[in-house]
Amino acid sequence: MASAALKDELDIVIPTIRNLDFLEMWRPFFEQYHLIIVQDGDPSKTIKVPDGFDYELYNRNDINKILGPRSSCISFKDSACRCFGYMVSKKKYIYTIDDDCFVAKDPSGQDINALEQHIKNLLCPSTPNFFNTLYDPFREGADYVRGYPFSLREGVPTAVSHGLWLNIPDYDAPTQLVKPLERNTRYVDMVLTIPKGTLFPMCGMNLAFDRELIGPAMYFGLMGDGQPIGRYDDMWAGWCCKVICDHLGLGIKTGLPYIYHSKASNPFVNLKKEYLGIFWQEEIIPFFQSHIFSKDCTTVQKCYVELSKQVKEKLGKVDPYFVKLADAMVTWIEAWDMLNPPNKDSANASTK
Amino acid sequence: MASAALKDELDIVIPTIRNLDFLEMWRPFFEQYHLIIVQDGDPSKTIKVPDGFDYELYNRNDINKILGPRSSCISFKDSACRCFGYMVSKKKYIYTIDDDCFVAKDPSGQDINALEQHIKNLLCPSTPNFFNTLYDPFREGADYVRGYPFSLREGVPTAVSHGLWLNIPDYDAPTQLVKPLERNTRYVDMVLTIPKGTLFPMCGMNLAFDRELIGPAMYFGLMGDGQPIGRYDDMWAGWCCKVICDHLGLGIKTGLPYIYHSKASNPFVNLKKEYLGIFWQEEIIPFFQSHIFSKDCTTVQKCYVELSKQVKEKLGKVDPYFVKLADAMVTWIEAWDMLNPPNKDSANASTK
């Protein structure tokens, strides 16, 4: 119902499909949508997409051609390249999912339509300014409880819907190594707004967002080929998005929907990708927790460029990587604005 | 298991028992604990407690006798009087429950041992400084997810466990009037820490706390007889506790356990009690959201007295009620320290 209404307003972005069962399994839920596939590796290899799907596919050569020198901001040989798909989309909403994520079942045994739940989450307001103990007050059968200030009950627009994973939990390498057999079997029937001022670990496996509201901040950074870290792409995007949403009065929800995460990635490979991030994160988190935007930051782009300056100045001391990342953040915004000219955006907005 | 271990460390505080079935229903779970019953109304009426329960009962005459002139801080003819029970208890933990709350069933049809879950919540740390998307990382089958800073994984001591209610939700009078038939039927299998810096509506229906950590801030204010408002007793305590926990590095959890809330209170009566609070709350929330404690505030008592001064200064402008409340907050601390001499507390602590 809600999902049908958004047929022409949502693109699904997938960062390479290695698993041919993936799209077949999602066919009933995805076939009506347009897919944007961003191939993360060797551009000479061909990705087979089953018949019946409406899709466009970008490999590294395409990215280089479209962005020119600005393509340096898009990661190579890493699923972080998916953010190129966010940039070339012309739709209001994006859903991104990994190719090892399958359809999960709810406790009654029914297949979960993850996309439909994300759309529900995005279409109703968030409540970042005060915690509601019955969680999302806009859900059927729920409301604001006694003591919730009436002036805050309109909520704020929802920019991001962060979905979860049954089976293989999204653990870091050390936790994977310590708990190789742990599986997430608990279905928590709940959606909540992450409160204002609170950071969270945003996972890109099962994520939807409103690209008109927050798209330019959904940059997955520099990972993979030639970079010292990996597996912090979605985290970086999450921390940037969260501080910008807090500043601009937008909301981020987490909880439902679940997907079924089928396969744990190799913890030894992951440790190699993560270990610098594990150190750096101890500086990154206090940086984001204490960040305050100036009053001039009235758009996502302005916030993001100002943030990049602070990243260079404050995190550049931690490692030269952050100087490079800060430059890439600016390049990303230039590339975004090139593909999404501000005039066109506002023209789009005015026709709605 | 956990609950048996705390047999001698927890008191159950109940603000008057009107319903004789109440204790019978809870007998298997409560009988091993000591009960403190604080009678909220006419002291000449007798409360019948079934055989087999170990209890002490306080009526208004007892409160007046024990506290002398300081008894003015304890509400009369309102369940807010329960906080007297927190003060006279000599145990480390308190569980407080209303007499219209019965044993709930989990989705498998089993009776929920609410107290056991509260004890679990209180005995493992809270995580207020960063949001974990799989919720309480200390729960079996869960952990911290990728991207959660390692330096924050020890967590902080848990001071409060806020439980929820199936059946009749804890709505304010306007919502009760608009949605008379709404019932909470969703069992959300989850406990989480309310993030630092975020306020929440703390309900006193099904609440446990560590009185050594936060007891002196668990004051339920001036409600009922002779006071202009009601139904903000637990809310007030919750806001005070939250800002003090945030300042002192303590945690507050919400979620499981559920009780079955059997009876909606009269929305017309509630509206009369609440309406001034509904206005005042719009000033109270920004007051708490912007409150910062001085560095001298190293104990709950010091925080609470400093908070009372700010209440008088800033909320006293909203209504003279807050001047009276601020004075009562100081009286409460004097009474608390009279019944819980600091020396004795530290002596207790040192023998553990």
Image: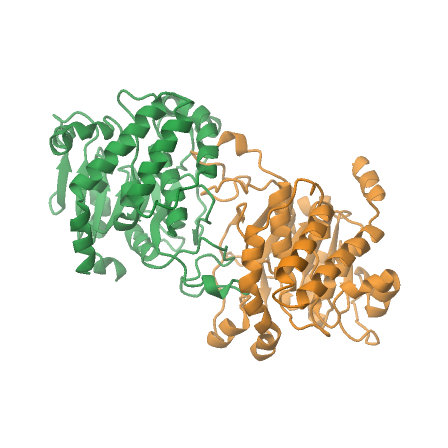
Chain colours: A orange, B green
Q: Position of residue B159 (x, y in %)?
A: 33, 50
Q: Position of residue A351 (x, y in %)?
A: 82, 36
- Which image quadrant: the C terminus of chain A? top right
Q: Is residue B249 left or right of residue A263?
A: left
The image quadrant of residue B185 is top left
Residue in front for this viewpoint, A320 or B9:
A320
Q: Position of residue A123 (x, y in %)?
A: 65, 42
Residue A249 drawn above or below residue B59: below
Q: Is residue B134 left or right of residue A344?
A: left
The answer to whether residue A225 shows anywhere in this view is yes
Residue at the limit of the structure toward the bottom, as seen here = A268
Residue B225 drawn above or below residue B48: above
Residue in front for this viewpoint, B318 or B223:
B318
Residue in front for this viewpoint, A36 or B198:
B198
Residue at (69% x, 69% y) in the render: A223
Residue B263 drawn above or below residue A83: above
Q: Is residue A231 left or right of residue A177?
A: right
Residue B4 drawn above or below residue A149: below
The answer to whether residue B229 shows anywhere in this view is no
> Number of marks in the image?
0
- Which image quadrant: the N terminus of chain A? top right
Residue in front for this viewpoint, A142 or B125:
B125
Q: Position of residue B137 (x, y in %)?
A: 44, 61
The image quadrant of residue A14 is bottom right
Q: Is residue A41 left or right of residue B10?
A: right
